[in-house]
Amino acid sequence: MGINAIILAAGRGSRLHPYTEKYPKSLTVFGGKTLIERQVETLRAETINNIIVATGYKREMLQMPGLREAHNAKWETTNMVESLFSGEEYFTNDLIVSYGDIVYEPRVLRTLLASPHEISVIIDLNWKTYWELRFDNPLSDAESLKMDCAQRILNIGAKVSQIEEIDGQYIGLMRFQGNGVSSLRRARAHLQKTYRSWMEDRRVENAYMTDLLMEMILLGIEIHAVTIDGGWLEFDTVSDYETACAMMSDGTILEFFNPDSN
């Protein structure tokens, strides 16, 4: 059985309004292609053809040839983890999970595919340059990420007050192989019955993927960082989108992402 890839595309994308008023966030057009088209092309170029889209908002617009759907019927009141588990029937012993509002170069995916670890998470070491472009204060949006000398992740997803708490940034692209898939289920089950103060006021149904990864770490499950130096973009806000489009027009986009790389 080959690799399955689940793209998490259930959310409304309210921070991208008005661009997402009429269609889901992952159908935002960038450089003549939608975000999800770019991801699908990149996955298929590496012969990953079993692609599942976790849908929610305007699900009918994400019915695309060759793609399967896992619908999160509670998308309005839940978050990433619930969207992922709406596609649990597609969990195989080799699973890629990707956010629906990112694009990444083929080299990023190939780096992930080369990792031998049961749980591999893409981490951008050059995050600060990109965050300075996106935010007046990079620490206002950045999250904690600490690794040991073997690139095992020790902490992820917390708010930060100083740059020393950050070794890199999580981009929303990861892979679970073998026991890593059962660890995914185990961590979610444990999170459902355990209060975690670091989740602040979020209910388990509103857990982020970083909450789930941190739960794995607390359970003693090893998560390995697969490091990159740029080569991706996130489209979370109007500013993200308009900045990326402006850079595409003037050619400066290549400092962060090459839309034509292979």
Image (cartoon, helix red, strand yellow):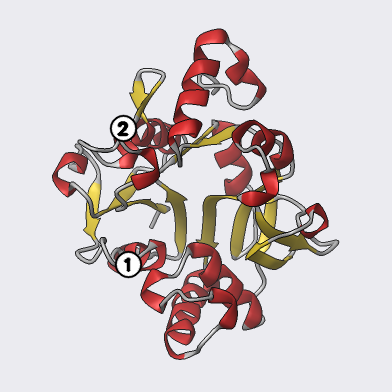
Give the quarter of the figure containing the C terminus: top right
Q: State the mark number for residue 145.
A: none
Residue hosting label 1:
78
Question: Quadrant of residue 43 in the image?
Answer: top left
State the mark number for residue 19.
2
In the picture, residue 33 is in which quadrant?
A: top left
Image location of residue 97, percent across then percent down: 45, 55
* The one of 204 and 111 positioned closer to us in this rendering: 204
Of all residues, the one furthest to the bottom in this rendering is 193
Q: Which residue shows up at 64% across the image and 81% down it? A: 218
Residue 35 screen position, x and y as percent: 38, 33
Residue at 47%, 65% in the rendered image: 208
The kind of residue tagged 2 is: Tyr
**Left or right: 78 as drawn, with respect to 234:** left
Q: Nearer the viewer, residue 99 or 234?
A: 234
In the displayed image of the protein, which residue is found farthest to the top?
250
Three-letter amino acid code of the residue under disc 1: Thr
Number of callouts: 2
Mark positioned earlier in the residue sequence (2 or 1):
2
Q: Residues within 10 Å of mark 2 (few under 14, many from 20)?
A: some
- Asked whether the beta carbons under mark 2 and mark 1 sit within 8 Å of each other, the answer is no
Element at label 2: loop
Corner quadrant of residue 1: bottom left
Residue at screen point 45% across, 65% down: 93
Q: Position of residue 182 (x, y in %)?
A: 47, 76
**Crowd tier of the residue under label 1, counting other residues whose Cα lies within 10 Å: few below 14, some 14–19, many 20 or above:** many
